[in-house]
Amino acid sequence: MRTVIVNDKMQQDYRYELTEPVGKNFDPEFKPDLTPKEMLALGVFGGVYMRDCTDEFPADWFRQAKFAKAEKDPSLNFFGVDASQPLSVWQEKGWISKYDPRGWFQWYCRYYLGRRIPDEDARQIKRWKAFRRHIAQVARNCKAKDFTCRPRQRQALLHWAYDSRNV
């Protein structure tokens, strides 16, 4: 077991334990299509997510990550569109937990590393499963692999570790 200590723009002296091997022993209902490293390399969140907390995660996750130089840049997203709501919206809706002030993707990165918080994990996995409905909408309304069809919905799916490139 290893302890991670976080000191970044959004958390100071936050500690968590890694109790599972990296990328292993996921809840059987949680089967993301993409790893955090793959998501960052494809282009997510306009290139602004996690730029100040790279020390917390493996360096190789960031070697090909698409990071904006300053403000959010939707052209860095794989589908070239903005598909994010501001953090303030997530906070207003109660989707942010005390454990992960940046939201679902931060939870997923920490879960992937091996952190487990049973109640929080169950909540986030439930949210992830609910987002899957967008895959069916893309499949029903778009020709196979037509990335110009529903690009915002496809980018949003990518933000949730669903890979709509095969739909």
Image: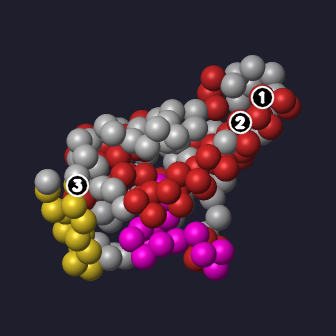
- Three-letter code, disc 2: Ile
What residue do we see at 30% from left, 63% from top? 53
What residue do we see at 80% from left, 37% from top? 137
What residue do we see at 25% from left, 46% from top? 20
Disc number placed over residue 122 in the picture, else none = none
Q: How many residues crowd mark 2 within 10 Å: few (<14), some (14–19), many (20+)?
A: some
Look at the numbered disc 1 and give the secondary structure of its residue: helix
Look at the numbered disc 3 and give the secondary structure of its residue: strand
116 or 91, nearer to the observer: 116
Q: Quadrant of the N terminus?
A: bottom left
Image-based side of 148 in relation to 119, left or right: right
Structural distance between the alpha carbons of marks 3 and 2: 31 Å
Q: Is residue 159 above or below residue 34?
A: below
Mark 3 vs mark 2, foreground winner is: 3
Q: Which residues are magenta?
A: 92-105
Q: Which residue is mark 3?
A: 18
Q: Which residue is mark 2?
A: 135
- Three-letter code, disc 3: Leu
